[in-house]
Amino acid sequence: MTWNTKVNVYEKNTRAVLVDATKRPIYRAIVEKYLNGTNLGHIAIWLTDNKIPTPYNIKPDGKNKGWSNITVQRLTG
């Protein structure tokens, strides 16, 4: 199963993240923060505070719920 998100394409069977080239700077910032020791929760807060849309987790009313550490974890692998 594969699904498109605002940040990337995630291949569930292989657990691979294929990053959309237009979203690459966001993904790279997430990875760099993670590799520099920033914890997942702080990365999630940073993304939400900077109004970066989540790849999913959109409420039925269309509003973004904000980032969670689990969402960041899925992107960092």
Image (cartoon, rainbow, N blue to C red):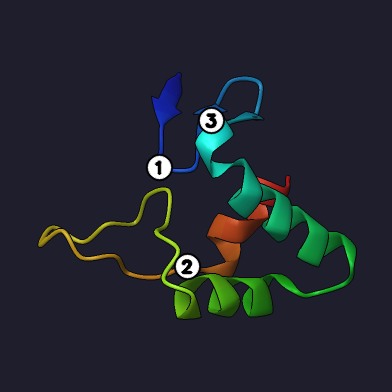
Q: Residues within 10 Å of mark 1 (few under 14, many from 20)?
A: few
**Along the horizontal axis of the image, is 36 left or right of 9?**
right
3D distance between C-alphas at marks 2 and 1: 13 Å
In the image, residue 48 above or below residue 31: below
Q: In x, y percent, where is residue 27?
A: 64, 49
Q: Which residue has dot 2 on it?
A: 67
Quarter-of-image position of residue 58: bottom left
Q: Which of marks 3 and 2 is nearer the N terminus?
A: 3
Residue 28 can be seen in this image: yes
**Label 3's element?**
strand
Q: Mark 3 points at which residue?
A: 10
Q: How far is the residue under mark 3 from the one under mark 2?
A: 17 Å
Q: Where, by quadrant of the figure, is residue 5 drawn? A: top left
* Amino acid beneath label 1: Lys
Q: Are marks 3 and 2 in contact (CB under 8 Å)?
A: no
Q: Look at label 2 and name its amino acid.
A: Trp
Report how far apart the C-alphas of labels 3 and 1 lie in the structure: 11 Å
Q: Which residue is drawn at 37% across and 50% down?
A: 56
Q: Which of 33 and 74 is in front in this view?
A: 33
Q: In the rendered view, would you say 18 is above or below 60? A: above
Label 2 SS: loop
Residue that numbered label 1 is attached to:
6
- Where is 70 relative to 44, above or below? above
Task: Residue 57 in the image: state x and y as whole percent.
Answer: 34, 56
Q: In this view, does 73 lie to the left or right of 5?
A: right
Query: What residue is drawn where x is 89% and y is 68%?
Result: 36
Question: Reading the chain from its start, which is encountered first: label 2 or label 1?
Answer: 1
The amino acid sitting under disc 3 is Tyr
Q: Which residue is most to the right?
A: 36
30 with respect to 69 (left or right): right
